[in-house]
Amino acid sequence: MSNLKKYLFIGLGLIVLGLIIAFSTETFSSKLCRDIVVNIKNGNEEFFVNQEDVKALATAQGTDILKGKYFDQIDLRQIEKRVLRNKQIKSCQVYRDLQGNLNVDVEQHLPIARIMRVDGHQMYVDADGTFFPLSERYTARVLLLSGNYFSQVNSLKGEKGKDLLNFIKKINEDKFWKAQFTQFSIEADQDISIVPLLGKHIIEFGKPEETDKKLSKLMVFYKQILPVKGWDSFSRVSVKFANQVVCE
């Protein structure tokens, strides 16, 4: 095959390929939306939003009829913004699949604790340190946080809230402490007092520093002291200071 024929053959192939791509792109962009498919990533873990909630957000409460609309007339980014107006939703991605469906993938925030501010306003915090609102549909059974500290912060992200956030996550990951601790009262300087489920005592924990050592001392208290003295023998237990457990 001469070079001229080879180049003509290659050129013809590129033209045909370009026409196929152009045709496919035009067909893909102008095809009608068959349906809206909502996928909730962690929908089995919490129930703050359901598929109908997400569809209502995606369609602006039904004012934007997406089903039956041409895809080249649908603003995917705008739909994502609509869905994210619900602050219980952590992330949203909207895209079209090969079957002609409009997919709306969302992920909910998952709470690790509930915050009750001094003014009575309440919210949840997730493992990233993000605060997000309560739900009228579902109440999560999680650790309660209160105290003056929450009057001055809007999240637990960054260096300032890192130690406290890590401590809360540590408690949630431990079956014993998660069952025993019901509430943290946290002062402006992050000094923590803990209200336990059993017993009449308050635990003075101090700042969320050297938490493993403090929890080890508390475990000695629960395993060796309380079984002997009785659960209602103390009103205050302090593990704030190194190498000692103070019981009164």
Image: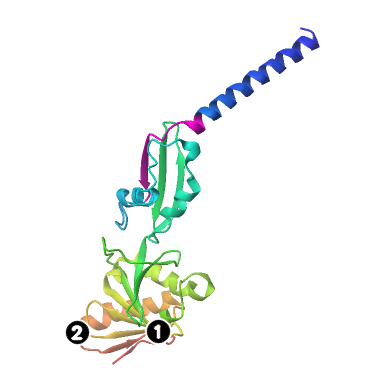
Q: Residues within 10 Å of mark 2 (few under 14, many from 20)?
A: few
183 sits to left or right of 66 = left
Residue drawn at x 26%, y 86% is: 201
Residue drawn at x 43%, y 76% is: 211
Find numbered disc 2 in the image and state the secondary structure of the residue it sits on: loop
Q: Is residue 179 magenta?
A: no
Q: Which residue is mark 2?
A: 230
**Between marks 1 and 2, how big is the CA–CA gap?**
32 Å
| Residue type at numbered disc 1 | Asn
**Is residue 81 something one can see in this rendering?**
yes
Q: Which mark is residue 242?
A: none
Q: Which residue is mark 1?
A: 148
Residues rendered magenta in the picture: 28-41
* Quadrant (top left/top right/bottom left/bottom right) for the C terminus: bottom left
Q: Nearer the viewer, residue 211 or 52?
A: 52
Percent x, y of residue 78: 48, 50
Farthest bottom residue in view: 248
Q: Is residue 134 above or below residue 214?
A: above
Q: Residues within 10 Å of mark 1 (few under 14, many from 20)?
A: some
114 sits to left or right of 11 = left
Percent x, y of residue 231: 20, 83
Percent x, y of residue 227: 21, 80
Q: Is residue 103 above or below residue 45?
A: above
N-terminal-most mark, 1 or 2: 1
* Quadrant (top left/top right/bottom left/bottom right) for the N terminus: top right
Q: Is residue 26 above or below residue 245?
A: above
Q: Nearer the viewer, residue 119 or 43?
A: 119
**Is residue 115 something one can see in this rendering?**
no
